[in-house]
Image: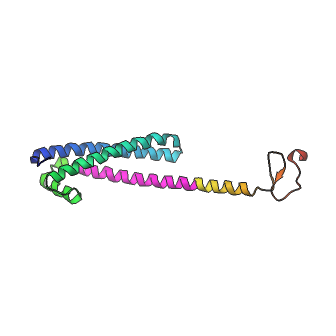
Amino acid sequence: MGLLPPSSAADTFASTLSQEVAAVTQFAALLESEQADLSAGRVDALEDIVAAKALLVQQLNQFAEQRNRLIQSQGYTADREGIDAWLAAHGTPAIRHTWAQLQHQAQRAKQLNEQNGQLIALRMQNTSGALQVLLQRNQAPAADVYGPDGQRLGGGGTGSRLIDSV
């Protein structure tokens, strides 16, 4: 792609940005759903959310690549400084507003993703702790616990069966 006339480049950039804002907003909404499901323990709903997130991440990457190619075709670097310089030279108030929306939604998605990661870590820690307790109890049964044969398990007691004490 060669140099586009400034108005055509601005139109293409604006279109790409609008699509990117829509996708990142949808991504943030999925993260909110994921957070609600994680908080409520609805693990079965997570599989669909993970699949939808993967598709959106792919789309977001494509939009970012399009945006970067456009910026580079106009002689700017494909980074924050390049975009800021392009916006200063070619950005209309509407394009600048859309860029600000994208930055806001991306920050929102980042925060939600971090919170979800913390929820997942907490769930894993709780599950691990519960498993540890169960495994320890299984290895050293209490004296007042009876096995499937009715015999008292553990170190104490008379060895009498539960049925015999009734």
Q: x, y percentage for residue 138?
A: 72, 54
What colour-coding does the image apply?
rainbow
| Residue 14 belongs to magenta span | no
Tell me if I can see residue 149 in this picture: yes
Q: What residue is shown at x 39% (from left), y 44% (from top)?
A: 53
Q: Along the horizontal axis of the image, is 122 left or right of 54?
A: right
| Residue 118 belongs to magenta span | yes
Q: Magenta region: which residues?
A: 99-126
Determine whether 89 is above or below 58 in the image: below
Q: Along the horizontal axis of the image, is 133 left or right of 140?
A: left
Q: Along the horizontal axis of the image, is 110 left or right of 91?
A: right
Tell me if I can see residue 42 in this picture: no
**Of the pair 70 and 89, the residue shown nearer to us:** 70
Choose top left, top right, bottom left or bottom right for residue 79: bottom left
Magenta stretch, main secondary structure, is: helix
Q: What residue is shown at x 20% (from left), y 55% (from top)?
A: 83
Image mark count: 0
Furthest residue in direction front, as rendered: 1
Quadrant of the image containing the C terminus: top right
Q: x, y percentage for residue 42?
A: 52, 42
Q: Along the horizontal axis of the image, is 14 left or right of 126?
A: left
Determine whether 137 is above or below 150 in the image: below
Q: x, y percentage for residue 16?
A: 22, 44
Q: x, y percentage for residue 49?
A: 43, 42
Q: What residue is shown at x 36% (from left), y 42% (from top)?
A: 55
